[in-house]
């Protein structure tokens, strides 16, 4: 295991924890923001995987799923608001 893998993983866990309040909140970032972050973090996670930084890749995919959840939540909220 590389020391960089540990440092990057810890930062990714911090990013994940920072997203939890947004996932639980009724206020969501713009859908395009969440989608762009999802795409870009997916690319970074895949690069980390190719570098064999396993923990960094796993935690990056965890952050990636968080952005996807936020995007889905925002789209659903917007759809619900249009129905009203």
Image: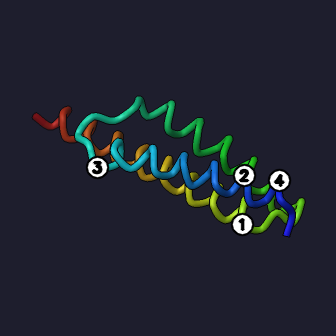
In the picture, which quadrant includes the C terminus? top left
The answer for how far apart the CA atoms under marks 2 and 3 are is: 25 Å
Question: Which residue is the site of mark 3?
Answer: 24
Mark 3: few/some/many CA within 10 Å (<14, 14-19, 20+): few
Q: Where is residue 49 in the image (x, y as percent from the top left)?
A: 81, 62
**Under tag 1, what secondary structure?**
helix
**Under tag 4, what secondary structure?**
helix
**Mark 3 vs 1: CB contact within 8 A:** no
Question: Which residue is the site of mark 1?
Answer: 55
Question: Which residue is the site of mark 2?
Answer: 8
Q: Position of residue 76 (x, y in %)?
A: 29, 45
Farthest left residue? 84
Name the one closer to the observer, 63 or 36.
63
Q: Which residue is drawn at 77% across and 57% down?
A: 46
Select label 3 or label 1 by which is in front. Answer: 1
**Mark 4 vs 3: CB contact within 8 A:** no
Q: Which residue is drawn at 51% across and 51% down?
A: 16
In the picture, which quadrant includes the N terminus? bottom right
The answer for how far apart the CA atoms under marks 3 and 1 are is: 25 Å
Question: Which residue is the site of mark 4?
Answer: 47
């Amino acid at each position: 295991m590389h020391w960089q893998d540990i440092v990057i993983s810890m930062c990714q866990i911090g990013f994940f924890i920072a997203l939890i309040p947004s996932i639980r909140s009724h206020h969501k970032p713009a859908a395009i923001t969440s989608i762009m972050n999802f795409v870009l973090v997916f690319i970074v996670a895949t690069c980390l995987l190719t570098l064999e930084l396993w923990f960094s890749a796993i935690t990056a995919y965890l952050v990636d799923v968080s952005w996807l959840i936020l995007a889905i939540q925002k789209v659903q909220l917007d759809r619900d608001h249009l129905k009203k």
